[in-house]
Amino acid sequence: MTTWVTYPEKTPSKEAVALAEQVERDGGHPLALYQDPVGEHWQIFCLLPRDRVEASPYQRDLSPTHVKRLTEAIKKLDRFIDPLVAISPRPGVYWTPNGNHRRTALEKLKGAYVPVILVVEPEVGYQILPLNTEKAHNLKEKSLEVIRMYRGLAEEQPSSTEETWAFQLESPHFITLGLLYEQNKRFAGGAFAPILRRVDKFLKATLRKGVGEREERAALVRATDEALGSVVAKVKKRGINHPYVKTYLLARTTPLTRARKTLPSFEQTFKKLRENLEEFDVSRVRYDDIQRSAIMGAPASAE
């Protein structure tokens, strides 16, 4: 067995030693076992065979542009100096929850090994996800990442609740938006997000049951989006075409107001919003008003 460096000079946990031995069996090279400087948890710095490392199944989609930029930068520097964080859900498999762009860049450059900080406890992969800062998330990426993680948690720990994973999921509206983006990658999530942030709450039901309720919430938003699409078409028929028109219309028809201290339920909000859209008089819409709202930020409805 290879002798590795241990810091501090005391006996590592049995789990860390067992994982280091697994890395060796998988063709990797554990270089050091150490305790992290915050929680003093044992971790492993190692080189893993590139083909053993893959993205976690709940991670966002790759950005080809970001991969290209990273690949060019690494090639120009002629060195790879930013280790990935990884977990091992089972022997022979290593998932990186926050380094898939770097992993792909290294793959393109045909690197044989991936420098990795290997976390001993695989469940920490869910905690690492909110720390993903490799590339700033946009709303769609974040929402898709959250719903994939949600599905993974629902399979692994179905009796837990959304509130149990509030830190990892960050905000309940990401779950609902994730379902909407899964069906339609062009969904106008940015227009609906301000309303969803106010009325979408973490469910108290188990994740097993929560999936169904989340689907129902997504269906309500989807029906509202269809009503919104009909109004947008009428506005465009009047010769008004502006990228901010959906946000403008939602701001004019939302049943929520800043003055309200008690918010209606999710279901009440979107049923009323859909009714308001279906009754909306498009003759009141002026291009200058939309343009002004786009510059200043659309205000909430005054009703």
Image: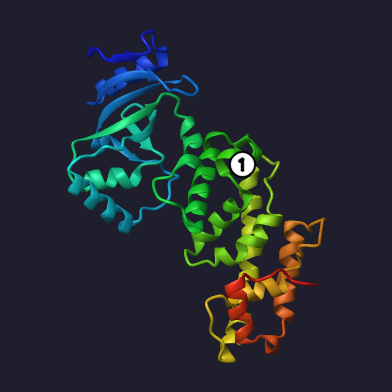
Residue 165 is situated, as x and y percent measured from the top left of the image, at: 60, 38
Position of the C terminus by quadrant: bottom right
Residue 34 is situated, as x and y percent measured from the top left of the image, at: 37, 18
Position of the N terminus by quadrant: top left
Disc 1 secondary structure class = helix
The residue pinned by badge 1 equals 208
Asked if residue 8 lies left or right of residue 294, the reply is left
Residue 182 is situated, as x and y percent measured from the top left of the image, at: 49, 58
Asked if residue 263 lies left or right of residue 51, the reply is right
Q: Residue furthest top?
A: 10
Asked if residue 25 lies left or right of residue 221, the reply is left
Residue at 79% x, 57% y is: 263
Residue at 23% x, 43% y is: 106
Number of labels in the image equals 1
Asked if residue 264 lies left or right of residue 213, the reply is right
Q: Is residue 59 positioned above or below 243 on the image?
A: above
Q: Amino acid at mark 1?
A: Arg
Residue at 52% x, 53% y is: 143
Residue at 28% x, 35% y is: 52
- Give residue 229's quadrant in the image: bottom right
Q: Is residue 246 visible?
A: no
Residue 254 is situated, as x and y percent measured from the top left of the image, at: 72, 69
Q: Which of these two is toward me, 278 or 98?
A: 98
